[in-house]
Image (tube, rainbow, N blue to C red):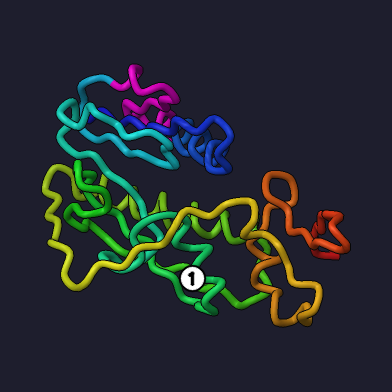
Amino acid sequence: MKLQILCDNKNSWIIPYIVTYVENKTHQGLNCKFCQVHNDVSEGDVLVLLSCEKLFKGLHLNKYNLVVHESLLPEGKGWSPLTWQILEGKSRIAVTLFEAEEKVDSGLIYGVEYVNLEGHELINEIRALQAASTFSLLDKFLADYPNNQGVKQVGNSTFYPRRTAQDSELNIDLPIREQFNLLRVCDNERYPAFIMVEGIKYNLKIEKA
């Protein structure tokens, strides 16, 4: 079996996790390849698209084209579903492995796991849990290959919008406690939390003592 993982976002937080996963699978004897450019994807058996910014148009090259999404599809389609759900106050968040289709987030579901949060985790800890569920789902898929059976998505679709840098702004007139979840999901380097005071922007960074 030939496994390929595509991540075209060269700044994605998940890249180190992909590299480690590919190295481990290669050492186990699996034909495994990490691609960061769409044209590097070749014919094979399983392609996994993680943190891709552009639409991949070569779905015909592999028997399975898998995507991971942090919601219980068809609810929570769209952008940054894990972040939006944390901001909604949720602590148990589904991670869904499903088939990539031309219609975004609409394919057959192969498996679901859950990230369980206690409420104190910061973004790097949240991402570690997210990555663990992602690759656990992939391991289970590979263990069942080639007899994988997906199920259709059932229910009404909901969509989350794309987050922007402005979504990291805290309200200086509200208590920190009320905005703690926003602090938790902000990236200190890429999209830090910030406040505006008298027209001046101040970045806020959070870390555990």
Classify residue 37 by image quadrant.
top left
Left or right of residue 43, residue 72 in this image: right
Residue 163 picture location, percent across and down: 53, 55
Q: Amino acid at mark 1?
A: Gln
Q: Nearer the viewer, residue 65 or 184?
A: 184
Left or right of residue 65, residue 37 in this image: right
Q: Residue at x 17, y 64 (%)?
A: 153
Q: Nearer the viewer, residue 78 or 185?
A: 78
Q: Residue at x 18, y 25 (%)?
A: 61
- Name the element at disc 1: helix
Eyeballing the image, is 26 above or below 197? Answer: above
Q: Which residue is mark 1?
A: 85
Eyeballing the image, is 104 above or below 24? Answer: below
Classify residue 69 by image quadrant.
bottom left
Residue 46 picture location, percent across and down: 24, 35
In the rendered image, residue 192 lying in the magenta stretch gets the answer: no
- How many tags in the picture? 1
Q: Residue at x 33, y 17 (%)?
A: 39
Position of the C terminus, as image quadrant, is bottom right
Q: Which residues are magenta?
A: 25-41
Residue 57 picture location, percent across and down: 24, 29
Classify residue 190 by image quadrant.
top right
In the rendered image, residue 35 lying in the magenta stretch gets the answer: yes
Left or right of residue 164, residue 157 in this image: left
Q: Nearer the viewer, residue 179 or 1?
A: 179
Residue 124 picture location, percent across and down: 65, 55
Eyeballing the image, is 87 above or below 102? Answer: below
Position of the N terminus, as image quadrant, is top left
Mark 1, Cα crowd under 10 Å, few <14 / some 14-19 / many 20+, is: some
Q: Residue at x 68, y 49 (%)?
A: 191
